[in-house]
Amino acid sequence: MTRAALLVLADGRFPAGGHAHSGGAEEAVKAGRITGAATLESFCRGRLHTAGLVAAALAAAAAAGYDPAELDAAADARTPSPALRVAARKLGRQLTRAARATWPSGELDTLARDFPKGAHQPVVLGLAARAAGLGPEDAAYCAAYESVSGAATAVVRLLSLDPFEATAVLARLAPEVDRVVDRAVAAGRATRESGVDALPAASAPLLEVGAEVHAAWPVRLFAS
């Protein structure tokens, strides 16, 4: 295993399509819930402990070798918004393409065959981590960090926020990312004995509602 592979997988320039998604930040900006660095931090913190925790646990379980089909069904059950389910599968399809080209893997080939329209992105992320020789903790870190970094990057574009301020937000959230990863890895490990019911189902109703509002816009900068 080479830990440098983690840097490749977590790099925002990895061609997995994440740059086209704001993680709900675009709708939150328009609704006035994000107006600057302080409100961005609050938004990212809420996202980290809800959607981020769920994604990190799914990724950790997939990286540990749990059945991807069961994890995908669990991801569906934890994503009430149809718009977010569509976005997660589009991101999963793009990540599958990028990961298969980067780290050829029989598991990724099987996933691509079984889910031609894409599996949920966190599940694919876990399998991509396995293919790269990484473990559950690495996969969870990728998912948790992505849950906040994508929104922070989007707000830089949406509000012309100073990139230094956005990066400082991510730095301040780092200890909380560590804690979320610890919870996610423990939950992923528990799936071995208790199945997918051991995975967190942290709710973020405003993100779900916002995703449906955003999907109805005729013009938008980000896909989600």
Image: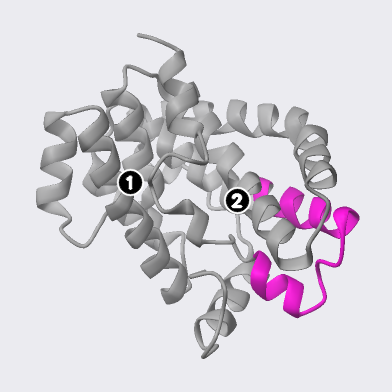
Quarter of the image for residue 213 reads: bottom right
In percent of width and height, residue 108 lies at 19, 37
From this view, report whether residue 2 is shown above or below residue 187. above
Q: How many angstroms separate mark 2 from mark 1 (CA)?
A: 15 Å
Magenta stretch: dominant secondary structure: helix
- Mark 2, residue position: 150
Q: Amino acid at mark 1?
A: Leu
Q: Nearer the viewer, residue 70 or 15?
A: 15
Q: Nearer the viewer, residue 116 or 184?
A: 116
10 Å crowding of disc 2: few (<14), some (14-19), many (20+): many
User: What span is colored magenta in the figure?
Assistant: 25-48
From this view, report whether residue 194 is shown above or below residue 219. above
Say which label, 2 or 1, has the lower sequence index: 1
| Side of 134 relative to 175 (left or right) | left
Which structural element holds mark 1? helix
In percent of width and height, residue 195 lies at 34, 38
Residue placed farthest to the top in the image? 1
